Each structure stands twice: as C-alpha cells, then as structure tokens.
Image (spheres, coloured by chain):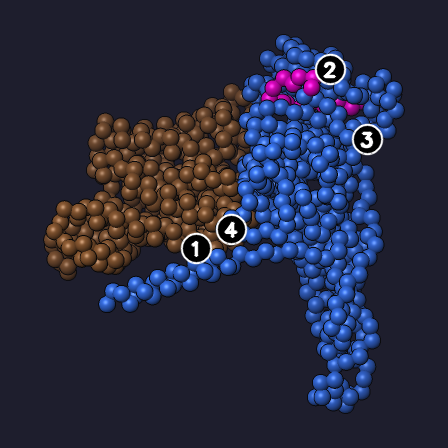
Chain colours: A brown, B blue
C-alpha cells in the first residue's frame, strides 16, 4: 500500500520502462552492467550518507560509541533508509538513461556526486541541485569520457506520447505539471520567434521541439518537486528562466546538452525565489508517518517523518 | 538478527562487484576481408571528411562532379571569413582512402573437414566491390546586392570567394549576375544562413589553372576554421534534388565516436551470416540492405557504418592511413605531444588493440527534404567502442565424408543454409523463395540404410 502511494514508485516503474524500451528499440550504447553499477552505487552512497548524517545529528546524544557504531550498521534496515531507497533508484535510473561513459569509474563518480550533493549541498535543509542533473554535470566536467546523447530518442510521435502519458501520471500526483508547461511553453515560443526571424519553415521548429530527450527532461527532471521552488508562481518564473537560458546556450553557444547546463546554473536561483515566494515544502512520503503512527508508536513515527522530510 | 542478513547482503554485493569487473571481455573480430561496399555504389553521393577537435574543424569536400568543369560551382555556408591559408586543395586520393578504410565489408570463413581436427583457412581473391556512376549533387546558389566580397583567392584550380550578405534576394542576384547558376528557390534557403551571420564560401573552377595543370578531375577542397559550431549544412543541397541524396561523412576525432545530436544515430545491421552466393553480388546486397534499414527507421536517421581507432582494423578492408595521409585528411593534432594522451581504459572495458589519437566515425545519411528539415549537428563523445558493418560468409566443407562426424556435419548444413537465407531475406527484403533457389544443394547420404544405422550405432 505504502509503496503504491508514493509517486516515486510510479517514477521508478516509468524510468525502468524507458530504459527497457530504449535498450530494446533504440540503438543505445548502453551496457547493462553500467546500470547495475549505477544502481548499486546510488543505493550504497545513499546508505553511507544517511548513516553519517544520522550519526552526526546524534552527536550530542549520550550513546556509547560502540552502540553508535551498532546503530550505524543497523541503519540499513532503518525505515528512514528504506524510505529513501526509491529516491536513490530514481536517480540511478535517470542517470542510466541519460549518461553514457566508457568506464565504470565515470558512472560511479556521477552517482556518488548525485547522491552526495543531496546531503552536502543544502540550504536551509533543502538540497539545492537536482541530484541527477548534478551527477550529469559532474561526469561531463570531471571526466573525459562521459557524454549525453541528445539524439538518442529520435523525434517520433510514439515516444513523445509515451513520455507525456507517463510524465502526466507522475506530475498529476506530485502536482508539478505547471513547471513542465511553463518550461516547454516558453521554450517553444522562443524557438518559434527564432524560426520566424531566421525564416526557417515550421517543420524545423517542430523537429526541434519533438526531440524525445527534451520531452523527457521537461517531464522527469525539471519537475523534481524536492529541488524546485515551492510556490507555483516561483516555479513558473523559474521554469521560464531555464527555458531562456537553454535557448541561449543551444542557439548561441551551440551546446547540444544545453538543458542540463541551464538547470544546473539556475538551481541556486530557487533559493532566492523561495525567499520571495514562500510555499510549503514538498515531502515525498508524507503518508508514511501518518499510516504507521498507530503501529510503531507516535514518538518514533514523528522522528521518522522528520528524517524522511529532511533527507529523502 | 541483523548481522546475518547484513553478511548476506555484503556477500551479494561483492559477488556482483566481482561479476561486473570480470564480465566485460574483449571481443576481437577475425576473418578475411573480401569485399567492400564503398561510396561508388550510390548514384548521388557526396563525401566529406571532417577532422574535429575542440572548436577547430578541417572540412574536406570531395569533388566528384561529373558535368562540364566550367559549370561547377559550390556554395557552402561557413561560420567565419576564411583567410587564404585556411583554404587548400587536398590530395585527390585521400577521400578514397578514407572510404576504402571504413567501408562495410564482407568476410569469409571456411569450415574445416569434420574428420580432421586441424584448422585451416584460406584467403580468396577479392572481386571488385561495386560499380556505378557517382555524381555530385549540384549545389549552386544565387546572387544579390548588398553583398560584400570579404575575400577573393585562387587556390589550385579553384577561384574562391568569401561573401557576406545582408539579404538573401541580394545574394541571389549577385551570384546570378556574376555567372553562377543558381537553382530556383535558393533565396528562401539562403535567408536563415544570412540571418545567422554565416559567410558564404563560393568556389568555381578557374579554367586557365585547370587546363594548365592538366588535371583529369577536380580535387577536393579543404577548409579549416575555428568555431563552436560543429555542423554540416545539408539544406542547401536539397534545393533541386528530387530523389534522396546520400552523404558519407568521415569524422576524425582525437576522442571517440562522433554522433548526430539532432537526429538519431543508428548502427547499420552487422555481423549477420549470409549465404555464400552473396560474394558475387555484394554491392546489390549492401544497397538492398541499406535501403531496407533506411525504410525501417522511417528514413530519418543517420547510420553509422564504421567506428574505429585509426591505428588498426580487423579485418582490414584497406591499409590504415599513414600519418602523412591523416594529415592530408585534415588531422591537425598529430604533432601535439599532448594529444597522444588518449584516455586509456582503466577499470572499464579492455581493448585488444593499440590505440592512436585518431578515431574515425563513418556516418551515412540518406536525406530528403521532408525527413531532414534541419542541418546536421554533431558532437564528439568519449565512446571508443568499435563498430563495423561486417557480413559473414561461411563456406561449408565439400570434401568426401570420411567419418560419421562428416555425415552429421552434412545433415546440419541445410538448417544452417536456411538460417542464412532467412538472415539475407530479413536484411534485404529479398524474396525468401528466390534466395532459397540459390542456396547450395547438399548431396544426401548415399549409403544403404543399414550402413547408416550401423555406423550411427558404432559412431564411425
């Protein structure tokens, strides 16, 4: 029940579906071992970071050091870790779909960077960067062999439909469809203006917007509710800003991976926007605490909810 | 309670880790090269070589223009005004060498005598691959006023102009007035390039120089420039083309594979075993196979036909290019000692061959106006996986059966031939019945039935 109520379960299912579809019907240079490495690295990193940060948070408690160590080991079965495993899976699947590399070490680096960024780069308890996006940028900048293939999905209607349907289902649950529409809408307008100014025919415009990679980005990455502004007006402003930067990077600096750089560069802007337009922070499994409260005792449930809210 | 599952998990984790470290194994191709499907197959094929590293590009445009030399002219949008020393005429053979080195290939194997455990292979002389008339798509553009001649050079047998224009009508008028034949409709297509502030590289043949030098054909033009744009304008080439056009692009990079970013890059089907009769009709086979793949992918992808380190090949359809030839093809990073430090595999996939600082990707794009609205944009990747379009012939052993194993071997042949026939029909779209008719016939086991039964019991 619990799993079904978490929108991340949908996300995991859909991302796995895309991965399978991509590997079987598209011509991807993707080695299945890379996916296994990505998943293992993300989950292990999540566990380590969670264990370390929970130990730190109990630094002042009067527990004996050995007891603390024991607690750290037993942390693997702690509900707060289990509750955050879906996040790690989403990140690892997302990275597997997007990042290609020649060496395992590059994928490991991308995954560690992605998960660690959630714990290390935080402002007022909210992680700043979209983990997947951070991992991509880390791999692209720090290693010589990582790449992202913007053309990997092609421009076919069926794939667009698949992304829209699956993305729509997730977004309906997390209530972040506004961001996707604002991003895609403003980007389409910008490309439209450019098209008119340059005198290209409209099929050029359609071809640029039908890119499967663009759709996937706007439905599954830019909408991560944990890292984007909390208030709707903030999200709209933010999405438009990313569309503008993407447009600039793609058409004037000729970066084919413009969307990822734009999202990365503008992530810090969300703090400013949150300060200007405050809103309730998104929590993935807010049902978790309530549901289990009766079974495991209220005090513990509250503690769990706090951890989940803080970390997942 | 906790330790046991934990130990289990840790063991599992390490098991997975060990599997992952061991699993990626090198796979080397082997076999004899017999034929290649090179650019001569296609009626309208343009060929370009692009040497690209960082923001630097050296573009070599093969010239197989078949008409009157005086009618030849080419207009190419370029990002910057080129200086005299950025333009040169390349060695005529260089594109041919790149084509031959990277062409899809047929390889053949020979089954040994099932009664004899020694292995032996034979090389068979290669029939010539293909014939056909190649024709350069005529890429003439218009002329206009408000046109600035930024530079004017004579390079080899070519007169070259670098133009910038304010307005496409002006450019069209200018080109027409200056004796360039411009196809109808070029105006609309020139506009986006002018508005993107691109310059126009215009070349025509200087007849005096051409006659003086006594060239038999036009040599390739090579231009070098620095720009973050890594693209190839194909829209202009579609103006007066009714049929689909073939474009072969040889990208040379110090990193790894190059792919198209605004269309899908798809590998051509490869490594299929096909009937041996294809040896005599390999060019027909490859053309049919390419057309089938092209249709299957809805005619809107770029095909990768070859991706390999230029230091080696296996099997080779032509000798790897020498350092001098690579330089002629525009590779400009060979003298830089730093460029030798190619990222070598550390913990990843092992590679069986020595590697160099030049990696070639052969892309084959068959394009039409309706499926390729945008110019091709490329990116180089760190992907050093090798790929080749390679088709396998396996000759069966035809000697007299001398043991029971030989009879078994014979009985297994029809199934193998059928599989090869199905592969061929699937790849080319040819009628399976026609293919089957051409399959070799296997003589039945002519021994009396009791001898067959006896020998199968005894195992001899």
Query: Are the residues flagged by discs 4 and 3 in contact, CB closer than 8 Å?
Result: no
Please give the residue where the numbered disc 4 appears in the rendered image: B348
As measured in the structure, the alpha-carbon distance from the residue carrying label 1 to the one carrying label 3 is: 54 Å
Q: Is residue B440 magenta?
A: no
What stretch of residues is rendered in magenta? Answer: B71-85
Picture residue at 12% right of the left edge, 51% below the top: A62
As measured in the structure, the alpha-carbon distance from the residue carrying label 1 to the one carrying label 4 is: 14 Å
Please give the residue where the numbered disc 2 appears in the rendered image: B153
Q: Is residue A186 above or below residue A15?
A: above
Please give the residue where the numbered disc 1 appears in the rendered image: A36
Front position among marks 1 and 4: 4
Task: Specify which label sits upstream in the sequence, 4 or 2.
Answer: 2
Q: Report whether mark 3 lies on the same chain as mark 2.
A: yes
Q: Is residue B101 above or below residue B143?
A: below
Please give the residue where the numbered disc 3 appears in the rendered image: B66
Dot 3, how many residues are within 10 Å of its Cα: few (below 14), some (14-19), or many (20+)? some
Q: Image quarter for residue B393?
A: bottom right
As measured in the structure, the alpha-carbon distance from the residue carrying label 4 to the one carrying label 3 is: 48 Å
Q: Is residue B73 magenta?
A: yes
Q: Quadrant of the N terminus of chain A?
A: bottom left
* Count of numbered badges drawn on the protein: 4
As measured in the structure, the alpha-carbon distance from the residue carrying label 2 to the one carrying label 1 is: 58 Å
B369 or A312: nearer the viewer: A312
């Amino acid at each position: 029940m619990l799993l079904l109520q978490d929108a991340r379960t949908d996300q995991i299912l859909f991302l796995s579906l895309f991965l399978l579809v991509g590997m079987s019907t598209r011509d991807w240079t993707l080695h299945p071992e890379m996916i296994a490495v990505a998943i293992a690295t993300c989950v292990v990193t999540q566990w380590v970071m969670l264990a370390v940060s929970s130990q730190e948070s109990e630094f002042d408690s009067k527990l004996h050091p050995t007891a603390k160590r024991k607690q750290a080991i037993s942390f693997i079965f702690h509900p707060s870790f289990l509750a955050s495993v879906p996040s790690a899976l989403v990140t690892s699947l997302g990275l597997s779909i997007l990042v290609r590399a020649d060496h395992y070490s590059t994928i490991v680096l991308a995954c560690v960077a992605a998960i660690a960024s959630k714990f290390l780069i935080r402002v007022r308890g909210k992680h700043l960067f979209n983990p997947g996006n951070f991992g991509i940028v880390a791999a692209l900048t720090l290693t010589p062999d990582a790449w992202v293939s913007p053309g990997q999905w092609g421009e076919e209607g069926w794939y667009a439909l698949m992304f829209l349907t699956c993305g729509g289902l997730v977004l309906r649950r997390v209530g972040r469809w506004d961001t996707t529409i604002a991003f895609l809408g403003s980007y389409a307008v910008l490309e439209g203006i450019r098209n008119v100014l340059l005198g290209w025919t409209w099929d050029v415009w359609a071809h640029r917007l039908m890119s499967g990679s663009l759709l996937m980005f706007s439905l599954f990455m830019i909408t991560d509710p944990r890292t984007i502004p909390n208030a709707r007006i903030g999200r709209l402003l933010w999405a438009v800003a990313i569309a503008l930067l993407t447009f600039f990077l793609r058409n004037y600096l000729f970066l084919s991976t413009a969307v990822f750089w734009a999202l990365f560069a503008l992530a810090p802007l969300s703090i400013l926007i949150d300060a200007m337009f405050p809103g309730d922070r998104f929590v993935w499994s807010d049902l978790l605490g309530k549901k289990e409260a009766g079974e495991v005792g209220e005090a513990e449930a509250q503690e769990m909810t706090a951890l989940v809210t803080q970390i997942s | 309670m906790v330790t046991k599952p934990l130990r289990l998990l840790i063991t599992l984790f390490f098991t997975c880790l060990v599997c992952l470290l061991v699993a990626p194994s090198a796979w080397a191709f082997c076999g004899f090269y017999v034929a290649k499907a090179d650019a001569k197959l296609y009626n309208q094929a343009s060929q370009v070589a692009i040497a690209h590293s960082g923001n630097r590009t050296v573009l070599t445009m093969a010239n197989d223009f078949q008409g009157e030399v005086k009618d030849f002219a080419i207009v190419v949008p370029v990002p910057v005004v080129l200086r005299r020393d950025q333009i040169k005429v390349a060695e005529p053979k260089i594109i041919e060498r790149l084509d031959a080195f990277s062409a899809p290939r047929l390889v053949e194997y020979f089954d040994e005598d099932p009664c004899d455990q020694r292995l032996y292979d034979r090389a068979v002389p290669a029939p010539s691959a293909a014939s056909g008339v190649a024709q350069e798509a005529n890429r003439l553009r218009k002329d206009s006023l408000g046109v600035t001649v930024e530079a004017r050079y004579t390079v080899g047998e070519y007169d070259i102009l670098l133009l910038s224009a304010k307005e496409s009508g002006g450019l069209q008028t200018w080109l027409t007035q200056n004796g360039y034949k411009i196809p109808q409709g070029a105006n609309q297509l020139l506009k986006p390039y002018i508005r993107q502030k691109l310059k126009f590289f215009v070349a025509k043949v200087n007849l005096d120089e051409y006659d003086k030098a006594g060239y038999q054909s036009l040599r390739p033009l090579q231009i070098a420039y620095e720009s973050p744009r890594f693209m190839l304008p194909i829209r202009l080439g579609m103006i007066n083309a009714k049929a689909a056009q073939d474009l072969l692009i040889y990208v040379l990079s110090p990193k790894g594979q190059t792919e198209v970013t605004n269309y899908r890059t798809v590998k051509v089907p490869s490594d299929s075993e096909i009937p041996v009769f294809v040896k005599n009709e390999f060019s027909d086979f490859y053309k049919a196979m390419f057309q089938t793949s092209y249709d299957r992918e809805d005619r809107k992808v770029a095909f990768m036909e070859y991706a390999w380190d230029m230091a080696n090949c296996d099997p080779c359809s032509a000798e790897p290019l020498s350092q001098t030839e690579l330089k002629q093809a525009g590779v400009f990073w060979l003298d830089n000692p730093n460029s030798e430090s190619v990222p070598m595999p550390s913990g990843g996939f092992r590679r069986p061959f020595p590697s160099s600082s030049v990696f070639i990707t052969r892309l084959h794009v068959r394009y039409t106006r309706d499926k390729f609205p945008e110019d091709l944009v490329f990116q180089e990747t760190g992907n050093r996986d090798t790929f080749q379009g390679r088709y396998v012939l396996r000759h069966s052993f035809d000697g007299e059966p001398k043991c029971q194993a030989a009879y078994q071997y014979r009985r297994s042949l029809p199934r193998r031939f059928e599989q090869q026939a199905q592969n061929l029909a699937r790849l080319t779209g040819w009628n399976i019945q026609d293919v089957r008719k051409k399959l070799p016939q296997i003589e039945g086991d002519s021994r009396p039935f009791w001898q067959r039964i006896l020998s199968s019991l005894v195992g001899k």
